[in-house]
Amino acid sequence: MLVENKILPKEISNLYDDLIDNCYQKISSKEKKIIYQSLVIAYNGHDGQIRKSGEPYIHHPIEVARIVAKDIGLDYVSIASALLHDVVEDTDITLEDLNESVGKEISIIVDGLTKISTLKKNEDYSVQAENYRKMLLTLHNDIRVILIKLADRLHNMRTISFLSKSKQDQMASESLYIYSPLAHRVGLYNIKNELEDLSLKILESQKYNLIKKKIDKEFVNQEKYVDSFKSLVNESLDDQKIKYSIIGRSKSIYSIHNKIQNKNISFNEVYDRFAIRIIYKSIPKNEKFIAWKIYSIITDHFTPNPARLRDWITLPKTNGYEALHLTVVGPKNKWVEIQIRSERMNEIAEKGYAAHFGYKHTESQKSEVDLWLNKLQEVLNQDNEHAVDFVEDFKLNFYSKEIYVFTPNGDLISLKSGSTALDFAFHVHTDIGIKTRGARVNGKLVPLSHTLKSGDQVEIITSQSVKPNVNWLEFVETSKAKSKIKSSLNEEKKKISLDGKEILERKLKHLKIKLDDKVSGQMMKFFGINASNDLFFKIGNGSIDNKQIKSFANDYNSYLGYFKRRIGSNNAKVDKITDSLSLLKFDKLVFGKEREMLKYSIASCCNPIPGDKVFGFVSVKEGIKVHKKDCPNSISLRSNYAYRIISAHWIDSENHEFNAKIELTGIDNIGLINKIASLISDSMNVNMNKISFEAHDGTFSGLISIEVKNKVILNKLLKRLISIDGIEKVYRK
């Protein structure tokens, strides 16, 4: 046995008492003993271990357990598992030891929480993604693994300042990429918001601090605004004998930042950065009635925006969120969002639907949790795909807005926003999706790529002769549809590849060449193909014909071909030397701690220019790709391929020119384009490649492609452009 009747130090004992006092659920004496036992094991196992902050390591699992107990509201098993979540990974304690000391249920959860420590790395492999996959696959057994993992990540993010900058960037990117979507999916909005805000603070510290400063400045005014709102509605609510409370809620910093970035607006143009929440008492059967009664009272006092009404009581979100949202012209003629929730709805929103209902109530009350867990399992069952694809599919399927459509029989189906008729077909049944020939939406024939809207009635037309093709992947949105199409295409490709291999063996035998690994490798080099299956597939479908196979055979059997193969590696070395010479002459970026000059190319997704904060990503086929730190793909790359990230710094850009795109909007004036063109032409060190403008009812939008030497010159140009009369906004695309 690992545990003896050992007395913990007073400091740790006090932390234990505080942990028990802050439990959301009631803990029995027997359950307290198991928690204490788990703490003793963790304390002994982590004895002597110190965190980067300098504090004893045991403080970390205790804080994780506190989040699990108080903020998420889980049971004693979860609290004990949280205390033990690192012991198997970081100490000599085994799962068998835990099984003997605290029971099988806790040891199973700890196993799910244990990271993969040794994984074979190859050139297209992501350790992080494999860890995510393992974590997600534990949902087959117990959702508590995910919830504890979220608590672990939250505490690590709260103490992230003690890590190196590169490690901070990696963790923040991971949090945005996988952990925040997970928190959203299980209804833990507070944890989701905190993870996002902490990540933004690391990745975009200046933008974070600027928004936070403005929010803090507005706080007093917001409190006064809530008071003025109360004074206008309190009497009406009291007359209806409704028991309620009214509070103000600021939008998260990350959400405001996202709106500013995505819509290209200023802070003051984010109108919903503040909301009012009305929380009322009610028995379950009267909740909907009272919510709409409050809605009626609010709209008696303030004019609502009909387009902004959201009824998540009648149709709750798939993560269990329920509420009635409306937007009104409130006091001082300002738009304000009103959120109407019962105490039960608010509890679900605060603690998370799965946590609140999955481990606190009866079996009959778990039906909604089971529904989304079953839906989740469909994705998790596709465990044969690449780990990165797996994680992307998970996010795709479960971190999105929803639409509601009807079957021909009138059944209501929830789909990801942006889903097509083909997505609907695969959602109904895989066999229907694979055999889909067409679709009718609201009685009209539509293409399979037709995007569905809430309220549509969809009918699928099938045919036994239809097979999925690769084009289908371009217009499906849901992970289920993507995985089933890929699976069908792979099966077809396997058949063609096998046929192709047989054809190749016959052809080469006729040409006096035996097909083996060495020959297939030479053929791959000859045709510029990276995998043998792809080679066989191209032969099977006729992309590589008899004439090309004979051409390879002639080359292979010739003396010239023999010498090519012998000296190929030497030529590669010569090429590298040649490349490095040209690199020294033209390259102005340095990489890594040693600030080496390496060959690179600019990523087309973000087009960084000198002055931008950048990093290098070592791709499999194209060498180092340089991305901006705020590139849309940055979070995904850092999360899945941290070991391929290399630091990059600009050292000189005088002899280079870089491409940049500028977008402009404003009021259309006569001669405006001439003014813009003249200003750019008169600017030193700026060349204009392309200019296009569109006018719409007195307004215009334009796109200008230019060449500049660095970011300083670009910023000066942007300031000069915004000073032109009629131009309202200028920004770099």
Image: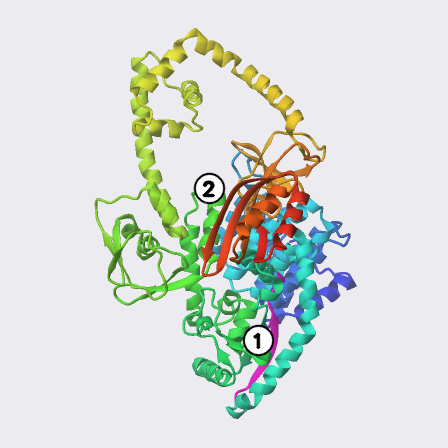
Q: Earlier in the sequence, mark 2 or mark 1?
A: 1
x then y, percent, for residue 662: 56, 48
Locate residue 459 relative to residue 237 in the image: left or right. left
Q: Nearer the viewer, residue 568 or 37?
A: 568
> Is residue 223 positioned above or below 654 on the image?
below
Local SS, label 1:
loop
x then y, percent, for residue 251: 59, 67
Q: Residue at x 66, y 39 (%)?
A: 647
Locate residue 583 relative to residue 368 in the image: left or right. right
Task: Residue 91: give its label.
Answer: none
Q: Is residue 504 visible?
A: yes
Name the residue type under label 1: Lys
Name the residue type under label 2: His
> Is residue 220 positioned above or below 12 on the image?
below
In this view, the residue farthest toward the front is 670
Task: Residue 386: give its label.
Answer: 2
Q: Nearer the viewer, residue 625 or 293?
A: 625
Numbered range of the magenta stretch: 242-253
Q: Is residue 597 magenta?
A: no
Q: Residue at x 66, y 77 (%)?
A: 223
Q: Quadrant of residue 727?
A: bottom right
x then y, percent, for residue 331: 58, 80
